[in-house]
Image: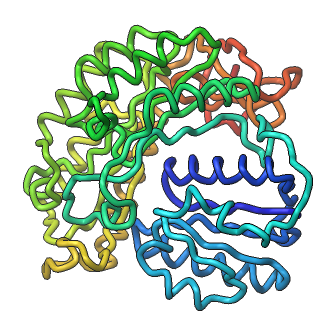
Amino acid sequence: MKYSIITFGCRVNQADSLKLESELCERGAEPAATREAADLVIVNTCSVTASADQGARQTIRRVARANPAARIVVTGCYASRCPDDLASLPNVLHVVRNDDKERLVALLGRDLGDGPCGAPIAPGIAGRTTWTLRVQTGCNEVCSYCIIPTTRGPGRSAPLAQILAEIERAVARGFREITITGVHLGSYGRDLTPASSLVELLRAIDALSEDVLFRVSSLEPMDCSPEIVELVAASPRLAPHVHLPLQHASDRMLSAMRRPYTASFYARLVESIRRRMPHAAIGSDVIVGFPGETDDDFTAMVRYLESSPLTYVHVFPYSDRPGTDAARIREKVSGPVVRARGERIREIASRLASRFRASQAGTVRRGLTLEDGTLVVTDNYLKVRIPPGLPRNSWTTVVLREVPPPSDPSTA
């Protein structure tokens, strides 16, 4: 049997898809060259915005048209929020909520057939080189715009022993970079008995002997403690890369979003990270067009971002999520204004990324080869092209003469 997995959304979904893929490979399934050639297509959905929902529906319809024989299984946050909407789409065999996602392969049962046992997933399968490991899921926060606590449930952490065992398996399969991720990663361990913490998890990872680089995924600003910053800065095993969602630089908007920090707190945090790690990648997320966002609110965000030490920014146009408090706010921002504001922030984000790349000229960074070996992702999250000669999944050291986007092969 040949399979294809289509993943929408966050790194947590990417980690979930990798785990599904690993289980399918171990059951003897083979990745299809294209989704049109697959017997089974799993669509792992996101529901953070209306466009994410729409994208999942459109993809399912396209797969059914192009591959009428495909058996489609839908899972993820949209599947948890609106299962009936997805069950009615063509060729959809099962809709599996997030609560059952870990049992998805077992739930399919006889639909998978009785093929021989296969090999564990390894670097290069379906074009992937690095491994993404989910250590936590769910969220207990109450951000007014977010549906994820409904679709993922309360925060739940994997025991440390289980995480270390999964890391050991990934290393044995040949993976050399692992991203540690979670829905609310900074809350890791609070629900365990005895309670633990993300700092304890990172210290355990830092103590491992394997030649593996660990990249910490998105952290809420209030969870990025000085201990975490110091540990990342001091450890050669932890990538100098921090992703801290800002969401907005107006305190009025942050309050309306129910984000538990101020713009000045965020700015001080990011500045402290930049001082401690001058070459670190520091990324963020922002929302434009939140209900009630005024010109003054938007100007506050523009001013902060233009002067910030951030290296990349993901821009999300606000989208009502039924069931959230923000959806009930009447003062909506018009579509054209939201689109214009989003474009303005993307222009600023492009300049921030270019500035960071330029600042790295003349530095020497460790990196891992991707694709055919001519693309390298550095420890501080730059992608650069190098001449052919190394295979995929090889450590290398690059001297950055200049750092234009990686379409130019002569940058290192």
Q: Nearer the viewer, residue 393 or 355?
A: 393
Quadrant housing residue 222 = top left
Q: Nearer the viewer, residue 114 or 387?
A: 114
Instruction: Specify the farthest residue to the right.
Output: 116
* Location of residue 5 in the rendering, given as x and y in whole percent from the top left corner: 70, 61
Q: Indicate the quadrant containing the C terminus: top left, top right, bottom left or bottom right.
A: top right
- Could you tell me how many numbered marks the image carries? 0
Q: Which residue occupies 19% across, 33% down?
A: 267
For residue 59, above or below residue 231: below
Quadrant housing residue 264 = top left
Q: Which residue occupies 84% across, 68% down?
A: 38
* Location of residue 18 in the rendering, given as x and y in whole percent from the top left corner: 65, 48
Please name the colour scheme applied to the rendered image. Answer: rainbow
* Location of residue 160 in the rendering, given as x and y in whole percent from the top left corner: 44, 28
Specify whether 143 is left or right of 171: left
For residue 35, above or below residue 187: below
Q: Indicate the quadrant containing the N terminus: top left, top right, bottom left or bottom right.
A: bottom right
Is residue 44 visible from the viewing direction of this image?
yes
Q: Which residue occupies 43% across, 22% down?
A: 280
Is residue 357 visible from the viewing direction of this image?
no
* Location of residue 395 in the rendering, given as x and y in whole percent from the top left corner: 72, 17
For residue 395, above or below residue 407: above
Q: Which residue occupies 61% across, 22% down?
A: 402
Specify whether 220 is left or right of 177: left
Q: Nearer the viewer, residue 361 or 333?
A: 333
